[in-house]
Amino acid sequence: MTDFNYQKDSDGIVTITMDMDGPVNAMNSEYRNAMDVAINRLKNEDGLTGVVIASAKKVFLAGGDLNEIYSMQPGQEQDFFNIAQTIKSQLRFFEKLPVPVVAAINGAAMGGGFEICLACNYRVAINDPKLRMALPEVTLGLLPGAGGIVRLVNMLGLQAALPYLMEAKALSTEKAIEAGILQATVDSPDELLPHAKQWILNNRNNPQASIQAWDTKGFKIPGGKADAPENNLFTTFAAAQLFKKTRGLLPAQNEILNVSVEAARVGFDAALVIESRSLTRLVMSPEAKNMMSTFFFQLNKLNAGASRPEGFDKSEVKKLGVIGAGMMGQGIAYSAAMAGIEVVLKDVSFEAALKGKQYSEKVLAKQVDRGRLTEESKANVLALITASNQDQDLNGCDLIVEAVFEDMALKHKISRSTEQYLQEEGVWASNTSTLPISMLAEGSQKPENFIGLHFFSPVDKMPLVEIICGDKTSDKTLAKAFDFVRKIKKTPIVVNDSPGFFTSRVIITYLDEGIRLLTEGINPVSVDNLGVAIGMPIGPLAIHDETALKLTQSIFNAWRDLGLESPIGDTSIMEGVLTTMIDENHRGGRQHGGGFYEYPQGETKYIWPELTTLYSNSDAEIVGEDIKDRLLFRPTIEALKCLQSGVLRASADGNIGSVMGIGAPTWTGGYIQWVNNFGLQRFIDRCRALEEKYGERFAVPQVVVDALESNSRL
Amino acid sequence: MTNTAYIFDAVRTPRCKGKPDGNLHEVKSIDLGASLLRALQDRHKLDTSYVDDVVMGCCTPIGEQGSDVTKMIVQNAGWDDSVPGMQLDRFCASGLEAVNIAAQKVASGWEDLVVAGGVESMSRVPMGSNGGVMGGDAGFSIETGYVPQGIGADAIATLEGFSRSDVDHVAYTSQQRAALAQENGYFDKSVIAVTDRNGLTIAERDNFIKSTTTKEVLAQLKPSFEKFGQQGFNDILINKYHTLASINHVHTPGNSSGIVDGASAVLIGSQQAGQDLNLTPRGRIVATAVLATDPMLMLVGPAPAALKCLKKAGLKKSDIDLWEINEAFASVVLRYMKDLDLSYEQTNVCGGAIAMGHPLGATGGMLISVVLDELERRQLKRGMISLCVGGGMGISTIIERL
């Protein structure tokens, strides 16, 4: 526990430099105590002319202490509320000081760090293009609770402030100056404190310099108060637009909008209290706990290499081969080239390979148009990709990713004929989404160097890669594959081999449950709407059209041909519907001319009218809550079974994989995580009720019962 | 009358300073109101679908209190979708008018269970921010001789010869009585703490009372309406009340009602409703009355309203055990007691709005709970509740303890 560095110079300016025990400054109890000490010294200071708040760390201040926040349990509402109010009263002390207070921003000011800056009279930052100021709380189900909402709304006005609060929009120094949040920049760290102090000296005789706008008499909030006609209309739509985005499932966004409007309505200090109450509510909410656990603790752990075997030096892919220049191959080539890796993009014809490369050119040109990339960088990236139809061009690759059609024989043939071009220790990866890696590896001379790298489409936008270990895949190979995925700035999850691995297997249960509801006579429109209502990006029938009914059918066929059992149990209902749809009615999915929906050109899709005739049953009586739970519990139970059977090595991979790969609702923090905060017993009870009503596929996985008995978390 | 209108319960929020630094400023009007509906629901395990209507007064129905705030309060409380809500505005009588309308709905036999009361967040929706013709229409003001009510209160004092020390005595007594009642827990039964959504307490009891105030402190306060009066309003008054040489501006912030935030709710229903929902009546509404008097003096309606109410009820003054006159201004209290020849020992026995504040549209409903609690505590039978009302109106309600 250390105090802040406190120095008073001969001009009477006190500089408080935050230099906390850990690697970064954070708003924890150490911060609060140190701030208290500094404030008590300031209170007794004679001849004080100004205060500068600075940081001795690389970042200014990184935000709240998530460990502390995460540990808060229902029953501790008053404790947490008091903490929030303490932090606020400290910042309010600086605002009320009769001398100017300056934030000297030397590095990233995130969350609470940014909020400290907002409580200062003047903000100056180093002109570092990488420096960011942002309020990212919302991404973890929280809100800026150190006065961030109230101050930003009062500073910028309700409408201008919301993007920074609701969407965590980050500000560069340039943008912060444009927005009127930052007053000045200096070019070097050495100039920061002198500039801050000079501003104080320049404003010695300016009484306004030490008063915040909102504390001046007659202050008018920019853009008017909440009831101003423009804001009133804006709020009406904002609430609806928010619902459209979140289905009302993310309390943080709801609270932020509400507190923002209140901040434009009530007195400043009352608004601060409202903000603390809302944060308290969020901190106790299961949604925030889910999101903090998965998107902060688990994601950091995964990205830091929790699933990477220890004991292997960090490897680097210098030359990558991509076989198959289709949609997946071209995306993989692009992502690798963006990370500075030399890529050979091979297809059977040079034209096909070149077409694959042209994809990168298109994506890069768009970025040049938007001013995000220079022509020179674009040329450099493109120069890294060689289109080829010659196997020997793959010579010397450290890694070859095969991304051809999902056909076991074809894939065997390619690996057999091409793996010789790999470097001695090179890794062969298959970008399959469903074929077992161990079986694919049977075609390889070196199955220990064979691994699955399941990319998601579109590759350049999807942040996830599912790494699949076959039964012979070596730890060294896994470590190399892991390093490659990190190198191309994606998040790796590591799973063991099983038909459909983790992500495909789990999402198929969502599709299956959608089809079951359809065959039970539920209006297909309801089926899809209720899928969206639980927070899925799209309903189970609609997504099935997108991925193609034909693909699902071919997966089942492939598994059958390979003698594999379906991992998700009885698929006869689903396969029956697929037969009816595809074989009898030629409805293979969107790319095949239509599936559950019709896709009239240039118009909104609508349910294929025959579908109702085929399956509708006006006697079907299933309440909406059951439909929603069936669509949520199926993939959840499947994810839990993956955990139970060792397909998942850890919950974190399952949580991150389900949210980033297959669109599990954000509020869940992943298909495993939400069960913890829903309550294990409650989950078990609900499973049993669903099982009784709808069948044994809802039987509670043993892993949940075990967790309850051992009082542990999933 | 077909049916008796029973009072099954009456609750109110604490009253807190109605300014941005008041405790309830952070609470939305719809939350103030909903907290009471939920309290009634909890206290009586109420099947809310049985409720025929919710009527709430609100004097500043604009902004967040605009456009039928009562319906929004019903929804905000999570009551059954079938329950309607109505906001009404009869200036300061709104809360009691809501009670009276509810009583009439039940007495007529056309409805069985109605919640009545009011809501007013004066800190969030400031008094007067809804505009209005009274004072806002110059042509009408010239035609009718508009004078602000504070000056009316001063004129009443001048006409009646109430001195500054007379009105300050009312203020002092109000503070003493309110403090004593609060200390002894007389309000505890009906004041429902306002909590946040985490269950944390925001305000537990009235905190506007200034129990330590002295007559000396009160005497030092500056008159509130002297400068207004000098602008010409005094001349308008004297033009009509020509025996007056001048207006004695006796009212100050200390002897006028306080600006506060608060809400009230009274559960009123028929015998049938009581049987169906297993509710025990605490009292009944005996009679109601409303009328208007000289709009220029504005505040002399309560006594005539009380007399009208007595007549309607077939009762004499001596049948009333406790008298409650809203302390909008001290002179209103003195004038009411003088007009009706009342003892101060029977009037405003727990203090009033000078001590605790006057959340405009909510006050009438609050007074039901104050008087009913006190009738029960003292084992008395009847109480008369009266308020002065903008535009010269007066309103009264007689309740009887059961």
Image (spheres, coloured by chain):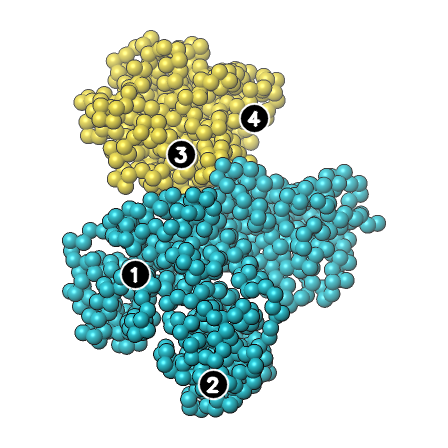
Q: Residues within 10 Å of mark 4 (few under 14, many from 20)?
A: some
Name the residue that disc number 4 marks.
Answer: B223
Task: Estimate the spatial distance between the alpha carbons at disc 4 and disc 1, rounded to whole Å.
Answer: 85 Å
| In the rendered image, residues at marks 3 and 2 fall on the same chain | no
Nearest to viewer (mark 3 / mark 2): 2
Q: Do the residues labelled 1 and 2 touch (CB within 8 Å)?
A: no
State which tag comes first along the sequence, 3 or 4: 3
Name the colour assigned to chain A in the rendering: cyan
Q: Regarding mark 3 in the picture, which secondary structure is present there?
A: helix
Task: Estimate the spatial distance between the alpha carbons at disc 3 and disc 1, rounded to whole Å.
Answer: 51 Å
Name the residue that disc number 2 marks.
Answer: A418
> Residue A110 occupies which quadrant of the picture?
bottom right
Q: Regarding mark 2 in the picture, which secondary structure is present there?
A: helix
Q: Which residue is drawn at 28% across and 50% down?
A: A691
Indicate the amino acid at tag 4: Pro
Where in the figure is residue A332, as x and y percent of width and height?
48, 77
Name the residue that disc number 1 marks.
Answer: A569
Q: How crowded is mark 2: few (under 14 residues within 10 Å), some or many (20 or more)?
A: some
Label 1 marks which chain's residue? A
**Does residue A80 appear left or right of residue A47 in this picture?**
left
Task: Estimate the spatial distance between the alpha carbons at disc 2 and disc 4, rounded to whole Å.
Answer: 99 Å
Label 3 marks which chain's residue? B
- Residue A462 appears in the figure: no
Name the residue that disc number 3 marks.
Answer: B35
Q: Do the residues labelled 3 and 2 touch (CB within 8 Å)?
A: no
Nearest to viewer (mark 4 / mark 1): 1
Indicate the amino acid at tag 2: Thr
